[in-house]
Amino acid sequence: MSDLPDPPFDSPPLWRQLQLTAGALAAIRSGVSGSVAFDAVEPVLRPGVQALGFQVLRWLGRAEALRRQLAKRTPPPAADALLCTALALAWDAERSPYEPFTLVDQAVEAAKRNPGTRAQASFINACLRRFLRERDDLVALTDREPVAQWNHPRWWVERLKRQHPREWQRVLGADNMQAPMTLRVNLLKTSVAAMRQGLAAAGIPSRPVGAGGLQLERARPVGQIPGFADGECSVQDAAAQIAAPLLLSGLDLRPAAALRVLDACAAPGGKTAHLLELAPAAEVTALEVDATRSRRIDDTLARLGLAATVLVADASRPAEWWDARPFDAILLDAPCTASGIVRRHPDVRWLRRESDIEQLALQQAMLLAALWPLVRPGGRLLYCTCSVFVEEGAHQIEAFLAHNTDARLLPSPGHLLPQSAVNARGVPDNALGDHDGFFYALLEKLPR
């Protein structure tokens, strides 16, 4: 399934889209996040450019390997970004959204029309024409390179191979697939069956996933989803939908219980909202250290008609915001490498450095240490990350349990590795269908 939307009648010429896509790639290579790079594109052009950009980022390892075969020296950044954009889109005829000759022609036109690449237009033309003549041989040569074969940094491939020796190829393959659009049904307002029926009536096929989700056959703008504006559903990956019910399982959700819940790293508010949908009588506090991102929590809750105490605060410094009343349940969706959600954020694999893992693991340990004293005896803390690396999952919890004798690990999913429909066919009991990579550990504080 392609990421590319149906082009509008007044869609810009392909050369212009290639210019903008290459510009976004150049920005990402300089360290800018994909969301910022694509948000800089004019809104009317953004969907098409982002779709092309996602495809380029998924095949960037192959494109860079091909460019090394075609050019002895790396071209200037703007020209290299345009050349690699064209190669990423053209190297596999079956996956290419356009005919290779069309891509080459329009890439050269893009080079000619940009003052920053005009001087390299002939060079880009020569490289791409050679690629068309020798494509099969060039692709075969690059097949020998792991980065080209798997389209992930070498350190990422090697680490994943060590840590998940049975699943690493499946994970890397899933990473390069388009992620599905999954809805979480707001059971306070409707039911899964009713929501599915409404979607079907609007010509949007779906199938149930998990306890309260629907996975769409094809992604749609949220404005086309019946009931979205009225708060009947939210967009949330199937693996992320596990968090709230897992944390609340076994707790007393009746109003008389006066359940106190903390969502410690809450933006953009999807899990906060899910907690309130399942426990509407709970007193929920949502923390977010970034003021801009915290406003997204407010927007999410307002659309769904829910209310929580939203604080702009650092979860690792409870003395600055905690009222000394213990929590019954804490959700710690900790900052991480985001290595489990590269299907949705394909820039992550190229932006991350191997050293980031150790730094983030230290931050995760600090958050666990700071928040554990806030849990009442008999209460729970759910630690989760959208990461596939064990340093941010299993190893983090092993270290925590070794240093906190008042904690015990309750039944938890552990590492959920990215799963795509393509490689899920042999796993009929995969209730979540397509899903991102997550780690979950549910911890209970033993009574004194």
Image (cartoon, grey):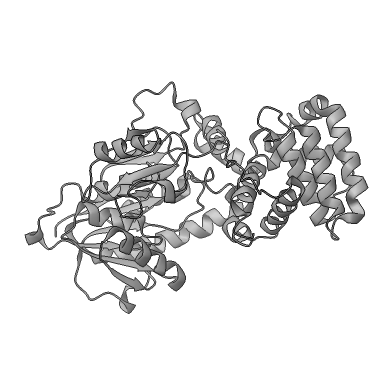
Residue 386 percent across, percent down from the top left: 44, 49
User: Is residue 306 shown left or right of residue 334?
Assistant: left
Q: How many marks?
A: 0
Side (left or right) of 343 relative to 353: left
The x, y position of residue 381, in whole percent, is: 27, 55
Residue at the spot x=58%, y=36% of the render?
2
Q: Foreground: 261 or 356?
A: 261
Image location (x, y in percent) of residue 81: 76, 51
Q: Where the N terminus falls, by quadrant?
A: top right
State the residue in front, 436 or 217.
Answer: 217
Q: Residue furthest left?
A: 256
* Rendered view: 113 above or below 108: below
Q: Nearer the viewer, residue 98 or 290?
A: 98
> Can see residue 385?
yes
Looking at the picture, how far across and down is residue 430, in whole percent?
36, 29
Which residue lies most toward the top here? 426
Q: Is residue 408 visible?
A: no
Judge left or right: residue 387 versus residue 104. Answer: left
Residue drawn at (31%, 39%) of the image:
198
The quadrant the C terminus occupies is bottom left
Q: Indicate whether 329 appears above or below 298.
A: above
